[in-house]
Image: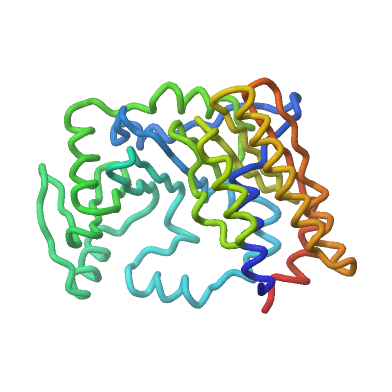
Amino acid sequence: MKRPALMISLVCTATITIASCTNAVQSGIAVDKAFTPLISPETTMMAGIDLEGLKSSPLYAKYKGQLNLEGLDQFSQDFGVDPRRDIRELLYVTDERKQYFLATGTFRGPELERKLQNKGLKATSYKGFNLLGDARSSLALLKGSVAVMGPIDSVHAAIDTQDGGRGEVPEEIAERLRSMPKGDQIWFVSRNGLPFASAATRTDVQSALSNIVGFIRVAAGSLGADTGVHLQTALGCTSAEGATRVNDALRGTVAIGRLSTKDNEASLLKMYDAVKIERTENTVRLNAQLTGEQLEELIGRYGKR
């Protein structure tokens, strides 16, 4: 398997399965109040990116020159929105039936609408808001520099939630967010099992995940970037026996990855060695932290292909 695919698999798996074991951390991630009125009480999973916080990190400043600037430049030219400049926060919301993205930032409404209409996107109106797009993909710009993006029925549902005054972050999700390290820029919370499991591409990773998905009831994880990165996830299992099986499967996945790594790939071995796993009753927690030096070694070896 090619190394870029391997690294993507490892990152996806780590994001799903890494949790902090430390106690001396400030906790609490807050959802932007501008998003709350648009969040359905039936929401089962949310995932957020604090782009403003991420862009202010030393890690971003160091590696932003290696981003795919050509693609971002083209996106900015086509749509009049530059994620590097205009978007502050991005939130994914789903209740398993409908899914949509919420974004806060600086949106030049008339310019954005003109460019989208020039691309042939149809303009419609719903409860006083202008929508651009079609049944599969639509965009609505709301007051307060908030955008809603997704299938048109999902966008309608978000607007209905706001219109009916029903918007809220479900308490089970809010409770998990309160336990996360304050300042982590990327996070997810699911109260309906393990999300993103299909993102793993390696056969052995897929096999391991398929064996544990049924034992996981809730999952939450976050990533924080400063001079290095730390990742965390807590997996709440259906029983102590289920937690044991999840714990064993994850340890096995890490062991397989380490054994399949060549002796001269020291940077990749360090990544596996950074993963720490523990089980407490019905919860499996893992922790991983990479220093700036370790990241630089990994990026230097595998980042450019």
Viewer-proximal residue among 69 and 299: 299
Compared to 40, does 146 lie above or below?
Answer: below
Seen at 68% across and 42% down, the residue is 249
Seen at 51% across and 37% down, the residue is 214
Compared to 250, does 135 lie above or below?
Answer: below
Q: Is residue 94 visible?
A: yes
Q: Position of residue 233 (x, y in %)?
A: 62, 37
Seen at 60% across and 31% down, the residue is 180
Viewer-proximal residue among 258 and 91: 258
Q: Which quadrant does the N terminus fall into?
A: bottom right
Q: Quadrant of residue 278?
A: top right
Horizontal side of residue 254 vs 75, given as left or right: right
Q: Position of residue 292 (x, y in %)?
A: 79, 55
Compared to 100, does 30 lie above or below?
Answer: above
Q: Position of residue 24 (x, y in %)?
A: 76, 25
Seen at 76% across and 59% down, the residue is 295
Viewer-proximal residue among 168 and 129: 168
Figure disc tally: 0
Compared to 171, does 214 lie above or below?
Answer: below
Q: Which quadrant does the C terminus fall into?
A: bottom right
Q: Quadrant of residue 3?
A: bottom right
Horizontal side of residue 30 vs 130, given as left or right: right
Horizontal side of residue 236 vs 267, given as left or right: left
Q: How is the image coloured?
A: rainbow
Q: Position of residue 300 (x, y in %)?
A: 77, 70
Horizontal side of residue 197 vs 112, given as left or right: right
Q: Is residue 56 visible?
A: no
